[in-house]
Image (cartoon, grey):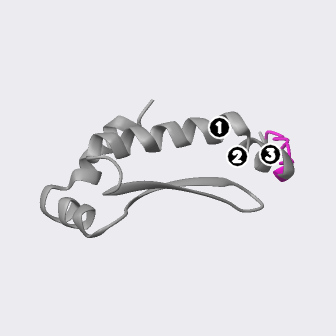
Amino acid sequence: MASSVRIKRIKFHNDGFNELRKAPALVSDMIARGRRMVDAAGGFPKFDVIVTENKSRARVIVVTANADGMVDEQTDRALTRSLDAGRG
């Protein structure tokens, strides 16, 4: 006995997703998380938060900002260990 299965199509509205990914509340939350990571890793000027935005999303990146930060990351994994500070 063959069963009839109906497949529903889902239509995604990418413009809506893009708006959500660039929402000011989301961006400010990501910046706050990045700053907590910087503080946990050893602070500015060794580490810094970079905010970028393109047409589909905003992005926050935490980076080593100078040679001292690079050494701290290489020897102590300071930035890597600060990941928990960026979690909710």
**Label 1 neighbour load within 10 Å: few <14, some 14-19, many 20+:** few
Name the foreground residue: 55 vs 64: 64
Q: Residue furthest top?
A: 88
State which region is magenta.
3-14
| Residue type of the residue flagged with mark 1 | Leu
Q: Decide whether residue 9 is among the magenta residues.
A: yes
| Residue type of the residue flagged with mark 2 | Arg
Which residue carries the number 2 mark? 21
CB of mark 3 within 8 Å of CB of mark 2? yes
Residue ID at (75%, 41%): 20
Residue ID at (45%, 44%): 34
Q: Is residue 25 above or below residue 59?
A: above
Which residue carries the number 1 mark? 26
CB of mark 1 within 8 Å of CB of mark 2? yes
Q: Residue furthest left?
A: 75
Quadrant of residue 23 in the image?
A: top right
The Cα–Cα distance between marks 1 and 3, rounded to whole angstroms, is 10 Å
**Marked residue nearer the N-terminal end (1 or 2):** 2
Q: Residue furthest front?
A: 45
Q: Quadrant of the C terminus?
A: top left
Which residue carries the number 3 mark? 19
Q: In the structure shown, which secondary structural element does the residue marked by tag 1 occupy?
A: helix
